[in-house]
Amino acid sequence: MTDAAGSVGPVEPPDEAADETTAPVPVGAGPDPGGTPSPADAIADRGDATVDGADDPGADLPLHPQPSRRLLAAIAIPLGILVVAAQLGDIIWASLVEDHPLLLITLNARNRYLALTTTNLDALSYYLVGSIRLLVSDPLFYLLGYLYGDRAVQWMERRLPTLGDTLRRAEQLFGKAAAPLVFIAPNNYICLFSGAARMKPLVFISLNVSGTITRLVLIRLFAARYESVVDDLLDIIARYRVPILIASAVIVLITVVSDHRRGGSELEALRHLEEDLGDD
């Protein structure tokens, strides 16, 4: 941004060199050939630059076209269902891990559940269901960031204060290594940042899908290499299934209550999505 400060005194002729170096970026300037505009400008340093190339972040017009509340609901409802499914999986995982492994990773595809179930699943089922479950929420968060930009990032920061430090660190890191993060750790907020930074959809999809498949392959190779250890863990889980189920339910309940008391949970954030981002 150019410096808005001035000094009182005689008006001097404008300096041509300064005019050339501080000329605003034309509105509508496209992203760089690498696929995204500067993530540091779009995310880590937002407020000083706009993701669309406009040089006036204080303008009244929104950075992104505002979609309808119906589209927001179409994003929020499936995300809410996925949150509930993941919480259910965290509660009953011990009763599913050996007898119903495919159902478990359908509900919640955490790394540990993938590692514990992959030896009891054929390759097609493991890769197909695992990929779909890991990928299904990513385009929704990407779309949310792409449509609402900075407002979507602020929504997540405000509604999920328990992620405070994590989100701030992730924003700073995303500004330096957007593509590797999408490949290695495409979690909810990284996908949101990718959309807000206007990463090209094809680039996002390529990095996300290839990274997810790589993750599944590595987990399956790891579980195959230490299959005896996995089998021993499954025996222990079967032996202490009831205490594990009780402990899991208590942990999930404590987490949900704690998040609520500290200012917000994922479900509450999604419940307020239309209120926070929808047009008045």
Image (cartoon, rainbow, N blue to C red):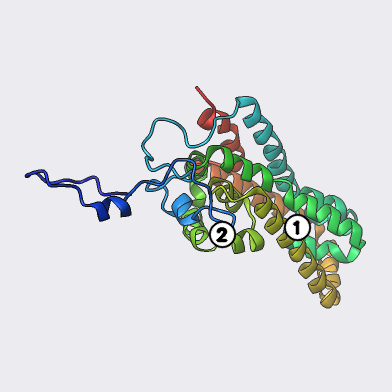
> How many marks do you count on the picture?
2
Q: Earlier in the sequence, mark 2 or mark 1?
A: 2
Image depth: mark 2 or mark 1 in front:
2
Q: Mark 2, residues whose alpha carbon is within 10 Å: few (<14), some, or many (≥20)?
A: many
Image spot of residue 40 (x, y percent): 46, 56
Check disc 1 and report its element: helix, strand or loop: helix
73 vs 175, nearest the viewer: 175
Which kind of residue does numbered mark 2 sit on?
A: Ala
16 vs 21, nearest the viewer: 16
User: In the image, is 276 to the left or to the right of 230?
Assistant: left
Whether tag 2 and tag 1 are in contact, CB under 8 A, the answer is: no
Structural distance between the alpha carbons of marks 2 and 1: 38 Å
Asked if 153 appears above or below 205 in the picture, the reply is above
Check disc 2 and report its element: helix, strand or loop: helix
Dot 2 corresponds to which residue? Answer: 178
Query: Residue at left 70%, top 49%?
Result: 249
Residue 244 - label = 1
Q: Residue furthest right?
A: 122
Image spot of residue 269 (x, y percent): 56, 38
Which kind of residue does numbered mark 1 sit on?
A: Ile
Image spot of residue 247 (x, y percent): 70, 55
134 vs 261, nearest the viewer: 134
Query: Residue at left 72%, top 47%?
Result: 86
Q: Mark 1, residues whose alpha carbon is within 10 Å: few (<14), some, or many (≥20)?
A: some
Q: Which residue lies furthest to the left in this view?
A: 9
Asked if 87 appears above or below 185 in the picture, the reply is above
User: In the image, is 158 to the left or to the right of 15?
Assistant: right
Query: Residue at left 56%, top 47%?
Result: 198
Quarter where residue 242 is shown: bottom right
Image spot of residue 98 (x, y percent): 88, 59
User: In the image, is 169 to the left or to the right of 127?
Assistant: left
